[in-house]
Image (cartoon, rainbow, N blue to C red):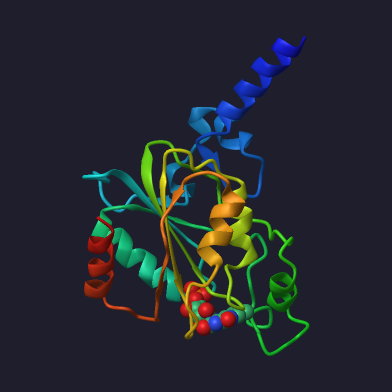
Amino acid sequence: MKRIHKLFMAAVLSMGLAACAGSSAPETPAAEPEETETPAESTVEETTAGTENEQGKVLVVYFSATGTTKDIAEKIAAIENADLYEIKAAQEYTSEDLDWNDSDSRTTHEQNDPSVRPEIGSEPVSLEGYTTVYIGYPIWWGEEPRIMDTFVESCNFDGITMIPFCTSGSSGIGRSGTNLAENAGSGNWLDGQRFGAGTASEEIQSWIDSLK
Ligand SMILES: Cc1cc2nc3c(=O)[nH]c(=O)nc-3n(C[C@H](O)[C@H](O)[C@H](O)COP(=O)(O)O)c2cc1C
């Protein structure tokens, strides 16, 4: 009986290896019949036909409430010839939600409680074949937005080099990269990098070069 249970758990775990994120349980994409998958609905944007660079396939995952991190993510993807995946909140953040001056705003509540896990609305992403994942987000109250924890906790990053990056008004990356690595519990996490709004591609390129 124990052996059957072990085999069942191994099968379940291996099914969950490559897929992560999304509003539904990880089994959703694996269980979908192929013909129902419409490429137009996929939230992974393949930036070019060939997405493999010298280290293997690269994915840039990002969450961006007001577009600043998105801009950096797109620049990284262009430099790295990488695919892009946007983490979207199931319940989009309004400007009231983002008001850090309001002690009663949604983000204030979320950031004050490290156990909050806002739901993700984007389709789950498959990490199959990716060897490097850049993972970007804005700094909220000195840390990663809680939705980033929702994402990393839904993934298995075994065998993947994880590279955090963030944008902020002025704060550094702080503990956010370490928090994500701890919550993910898998992946080879490198030190992260903070960028200011509108950082030029040349500066981003120098950072990427320094990683190699
Ligand atoms: C709720 C909230 C909290 C923030 N907290 C910080 C902070 O602690 N330090 C900082 O430098 N910037 C902070 N910011 C500014 C954002 O980090 C910055 O504007 C970021 O580039 C926005 O990225 P996005 O456009 O991709 O959402 C905060 C913004 C919001 C909405």
**Drawn side of residue 103 relative to residue 87, left or right:** right
x%, y% of residue 205? 24, 67
Q: From the viewer's perspective, is residue 120 above or below residue 37?
A: below
> What residue is drawn where x is 58% and y is 60%?
179
x%, y% of residue 98? 64, 80
> What residue is drawn where x is 53% and y is 58%?
87
Which part of the image, by quadrant, shows the N terminus?
Answer: top right
Q: In front here: 58 or 35?
A: 58
The answer to whether one can see residue 55 in this image is yes
The answer to whether one can see residue 66 in this image is no
x%, y% of residue 64? 50, 69
x%, y% of residue 128? 43, 36
**Drawn side of residue 132 relative to residue 202, left or right:** right
**Which quadrant would residue 8 be assigned to in this image?**
top right
Tally of numbered tags: 0
**Drawn side of residue 90 relative to residue 206, left or right:** right
> What residue is drawn where x is 42% and y is 64%?
192
Quadrant in which ligand 1 is drawn = bottom right
Q: From the viewer's perspective, is residue 35 above or below residue 189?
A: above
Which part of the image, by quadrant, shows the C terminus?
Answer: bottom left
